Image (cartoon, rainbow, N blue to C red):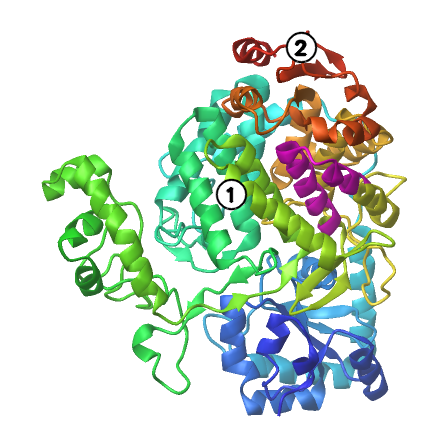
Amino acid sequence: MPNRLAAEQSPYLLQHKDNPVDWYPWGQDAFDLARRENKPIFLSVGYSTCHWCHVMEHESFENPVIAEVLSRYFVSIKVDREERPDVDRVYMTFVQSSTGSGGWPMSVWLTPTLEPFYGGTYFPPEARWGRPGFVEILEEIARVWREEQPKVEQSAVTIMGRLQSMRSTGEPGAVPDAGVLSRTVGEFASSFDPRRGGFGGAPKFPRPSELLFLLREYARTGAANARDMALVTLRAMALGGMRDHLGGGFHRYSVDADWRVPHFEKMLYDQAQLVLAYAEAAQLTGDRFYADVALDTLDYVRRDLTSPGGGFFSAEDADSVPPEHAHEPRPHKTEGAFYIWRDDEIQDVLGDDAAVFRARFGILPDGNAPNDPQGEFTEKNLLYTARSLDDVASMTGRPVEGVMDGLRRARPLLMARRGSRPRPHLDDKVLTAWNGLMIAAFARAARTIGGAESYLEDAQKAARFVREHLCQSSSQTLLRRYREGSSGVDAYAEDYAYLIFGLLELFQADGDPDWLEWATTLQRRQDELFCDAIDGGWFSTTGKDESVLLRLKEDYDGAEPAASSVSVMNLLVLSHLGVGGFSEQITRTLGVFASRLAQSGRVAPMMLAALSIYHAGTPQLVITGDPSADDTKALREVVMHRYLPTTIVVPLAPAARARISELLPWTASMKEIDGRATAYLCRDFACEAPTTDGAELGRLLDRR
């Protein structure tokens, strides 16, 4: 019989609805039961595309013996970390502080009043790999609770006191000087892998906020090492196995230092942030390679992660059923089964073009996965760019054009074969925060990459979807999650911050004043709900949910940037657009993070990117004219070919002039000269002489 999770919307919770474990969702029913029966809580946190979450479910939560032990001694609660990052952050803070590391699945034991007293991540059912067995742990925790409950409860109170004291981001101070930025570039350089790209050894994660910071520092100072670290890393990731060379998009991370062997899940937030990084690299270098990677990633999102209504789905799983086992009644899923290839399959599908594809992507008869001690990829091949087109031409005896033609023919054929395999699980919930990032990525690509104008519509549709399904129009209060017609979960600070970021990018792409007005309204609502008006920055939560024991202010830009980091960047844009009332928040937030940035700047690269913009200055560029007219397009193309990460672009179309002038009164006098599209370049609202000439605009931009 399905358990209580069958009534939930979360794909992760629904994956566990048929477990024999007597699961509860996070909520008062579970808390009341634990207090009534004086049982500790077993809290299991994960997400639907998490490989080791699947492993622990199969090994432990599907096991009736373990389920009986859990039911006898504990109240068991399941939490989707993507729906409830507030709950996840509290207990991840505990696990990281008590064990030195963290991850998912996260396993934490709580008192009935929700204080944690023991925790970890994945536990095998029996002791192995130096980890204690799950049943052993359950039995021992139950014994200790039974025999030493007062001591456990006192320890939990002490732990919570320690966690409370860790919440502060530091004493408010002055805005850090630019020396912090240069020192942190040096810290990145000391751990940079010049041969393979990235920082440090295996595993290697894509952390686009690091690359965006380095690119901004190059724009601000001309520091070649900052530029080169970012570009080498972006190229290495795109050529390696972490990128899906057939379907587009990027897997979660590389388990090795060469970017060869990926962990195969695909997350929406990674796609969005990597598109932004590749689009900026394309602008900076003029190299079409980076632009093509960005657009290929957007094509993947368009095809596989976009709902019929225009919202973006959350993720695709790493695990799937190997095609050779698809006919079995209950086939076992394995990691990467959808993406890997046997050599004979390549030959069967491609025929005469197989040799070209083998040479380009490193296909070998016995498989090409290095360091595969568990034999997961025996006789299977991971696609990575093994050789240049010139080397492939030399190996196969074809001209380079012939090699390229063969590769172009191969892709749709292999995609069709792959499409016949069982697909990985799709997490089809729509999250406001991640949609905000993806809106920003589509909008940025549309205005900065030549030939990408059609991607603007994807951003617009997604923004309309969020406004319709995830925004309560009466209060402009956001919800976090939409799935199958149901919206729910009050939004967090990052939902507001990321969506505002997307709307500001969208306004700069299409000039629709609705996006600017909505972004401004949401910013003021975010401030009402989350802003720390005393010290600066934004708390992750409102503090109203009493079951969330800590009101945290995130200061780490990890796989997803912190809400405060993105919000500072948003306020820099809004304040330099002339939207008033935000300057003090910018300086106060940069000041409260000053000690963090000075001591360990690498942990907050997006905040450093905001600080870089703060010191570089933020020009405004207004381009008036009909957006469909050739002269307007010509001026915008001048901007497209220059890397200007701190410049705010305001498209001012005649049809929107009145509304934009109401929102941004300083633009009221900016009109076309002699009926021609005109550019106004300003800094702090003091403007250069307007120009209708693209070459002159280019000179003005280059001079600044």
Between discs 2 and 1, the one toward the N terminus: 1
Residue topped by disc 2: 690
Q: Quadrant of the N terminus?
A: bottom right
Is 73 placed above or below 195 here? below
Name the one closer to the observer, 302 or 168. 302
Q: List x then y, in percent, for residue 634.
A: 52, 20
Residue 645 in picture, x, y percent from top left: 60, 27
Using the rendered image of the protein, determine whether residue 192 is visible from the camera's viewpoint. yes
Relative side of 295 to 501, left or right: left
Q: CA distance from mark 2 to mark 1?
A: 35 Å
**Residue 237 sits in quarter:** top left
What residue sits right under mark 1 in the picture? 274
Kindly identify the amino acid type of the residue bearing the numbered disc 2.
Answer: Pro
The residue stretch that appears in magenta: 495-520
The quadrant where residue 16 appears? bottom right
Q: Compared with residue 47, is residue 23 higher up or lower down, i.e. above or below?
A: below
Q: For numbered disc 1, what is the local secondary structure?
A: helix
Query: Where's residue 279, x and y in %?
Result: 50, 35
Q: Nearer the viewer, mark 2 or mark 1?
A: 2
Does any portion of residue 193 appear in the rendered image?
no
Pick the front one: 332 or 676: 676
Label the magenta part by its dominant secondary structure.
helix
For the point 29% across and 45% down, the residue is 385
Crowd tier of the residue under label 1, counting other residues whose Cα lies within 10 Å: few below 14, some 14–19, many 20 or above: many
Badge 2 element: loop
Q: Could you tell me if the residues under marks 2 and 1 are in contact, i.e. CB atoms within 8 Å?
A: no
Horizontal and vertical percent position of residue 654: 70, 26
